[in-house]
Image: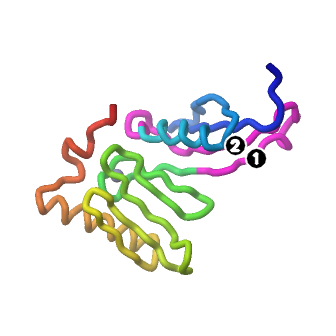
Amino acid sequence: MVVTGRIYVPSAVEEGGSVVAMGCFSTQATALSVLRSFLKKSHQVPLERASIAAWEVDVVGDDGVTILSEYECRHCPVCQRPTFWIDIERFKAACYGSACGAWIEESAVEAEVIDCGWPPTQFAEQVESIDDAMRTLRRIAARAEAAGMSATDERFSMDSF
Ligand SMILES: [Zn+2]
């Protein structure tokens, strides 16, 4: 088989700098779904960054590679696990931890409006800054905890099978 054109390569960088290889794929969508399922494990394997690159086959050197998206890992404001992945280019963040799914996103329609939410309680709110969004999510987690629904209890820290 002769491979021509572009291939899509997801990768992640562990704490300490080693790169995790995940394979190369013929479509961006496949590369993204492979990366996403890997990022769910970032509370087991400490990760710092992740990216998806497109490589032109048979092109030598840097000219052959384009970074399509880059992500940074943080602690989730709700479940506290290091599974909160931020898309650096356009501010868009989501927790990949099982059963959490907290998210923050710049509004696509209004400038300087940040949407955030936490699906288990169907909570969603609009705020003015990313810091506000982080604070709002922490408040929601605290409120859920006070109501006996801890974001760090078994249901939330359980690994997906
Ligand atoms: Zn979370």
* For residue 81, above or below residue 123: above
Q: Describe residue 113's horizontal placement relative to residue 21 as left or right.
A: left
Secondary structure type for disc 1:
strand
Is 102 displayed left or right of 9 in the figure? left
Where is residue 3 drawn, in percent x and y? 80, 27
Disc 1, disc 2: CB below 8 Å? Answer: yes
Tell me if residue 52 is in the magenta stretch: yes
Please identify the quadrant where the C terminus is shown: top left
Task: Determine crowd level at label 1: few under 14, some 14-19, many 20+ residues with C-alpha closer than 10 A.
Answer: few
Kindly identify the amino acid type of the residue bearing the numbered disc 1. Answer: Thr
- Dot 2 lies on which element? strand
Counting residues from the start of the chain, the first of labels 1 and 2 encountered is 2
Quadrant in which the N terminus is drawn: top right
Q: Residue furthest top?
A: 1
Instruction: Name the residue: 44% across, 55% down.
Output: 94
Q: Where residue 18 sits: x, y (%)? A: 58, 32
Q: Residue at x 58, y 36 (%)?
A: 17
| Disc assigned to residue 48 | none
- Crowd tier of the residue under label 2, counting other residues whose Cα lies within 10 Å: few below 14, some 14–19, many 20 or above: many
Residue linked to disc 2: 53
How many angstroms separate mark 1 from mark 2 (CA)? Answer: 6 Å
Disc number for residue 66: 1
At a point 36% along the width and 73% down the height, the residue shown is 125
Q: Position of residue 88 (x, y in %)?
A: 58, 58
The magenta region covers 41-70
Amino acid carrying label 2: it is Ala
Q: Within the magenta stretch, is there residue 12?
A: no
Rendering quarter of residue 90: bottom right
Q: Is mark 1 within 8 Å of ligand 1?
A: no
